[in-house]
Image (cartoon, rainbow, N blue to C red):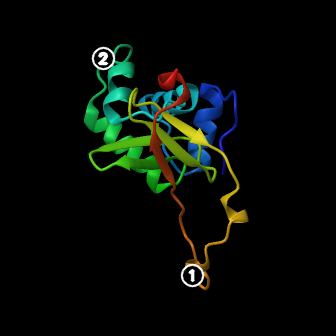
Amino acid sequence: MQRKVGINMTDIEKYLKENEIKPSYQRIRIYEYLIKYKNHPTVDNIYQELVQNIPTLSKTTVYNTLNIFLDKKIIQLIGIEENEMRYDADTSNHAHFKCKTCGKVYDIFHDFSKYPIKELEGFKILEEQMYFKGICKKCIN
């Protein structure tokens, strides 16, 4: 199920329940952060932002919550760098571009199915991940 744009806390609570996730306050706020900022955050990014308003939040809670979300397929893991895991609430099929200068990760929406890969004929694709690395327009200028 794809998330809706402009979702509020009540919608998030309902969405989590529909995906068999107990909608605790921390889980709602973590999912809200993911869909509101769309910045492909790390666990530390999420923790640092939310702990300001939820002083009882721990990094363990953030990790555990993200793992639940991954298990229920309401977010996706972005592993562009080996030592840096990022998270994306947009579960649609899309690629990512990471700027090597500023570190920002951009969504790349393109229908890659129009370009069949001969070496994959006869295979059943269960998951697709495509990443690009380079320098973004802002950093080039």
Q: 66 and 101: which one is in front? A: 101
Q: Is residue 46 above or below residue 17?
A: above
Question: Hey, which quadrant is residue 57 in on the image?
Answer: top left
Q: Position of residue 63 (x, y in %)?
A: 32, 41
Q: Regarding mark 1 in the picture, which secondary structure is present there?
A: loop
The residue under label 1 is 123
| Residue drawn at 50 percent across, 42 percent down | 97
Looking at the rendered structure, the secondary structure element under dot 2 is loop
Along the line of sight, which residue is nearer the eye, 45 or 51? 45
Residue at 36 percent of width and 35 percent of height: 42
Closer-to-camera residue (62/10): 62
Relative to 64, residue 121 above or below: below
Q: Earlier in the sequence, mark 1 or mark 2?
A: 2
Circle 2 sits on which residue? 55
In the rendering, at what x and y percent does residue 8 appear?
Answer: 64, 25
In x, y percent, where is residue 134?
Answer: 45, 39
Q: Dot 2 surroundings within 10 Å: few (below 14), some, or many (20 or more)?
A: few
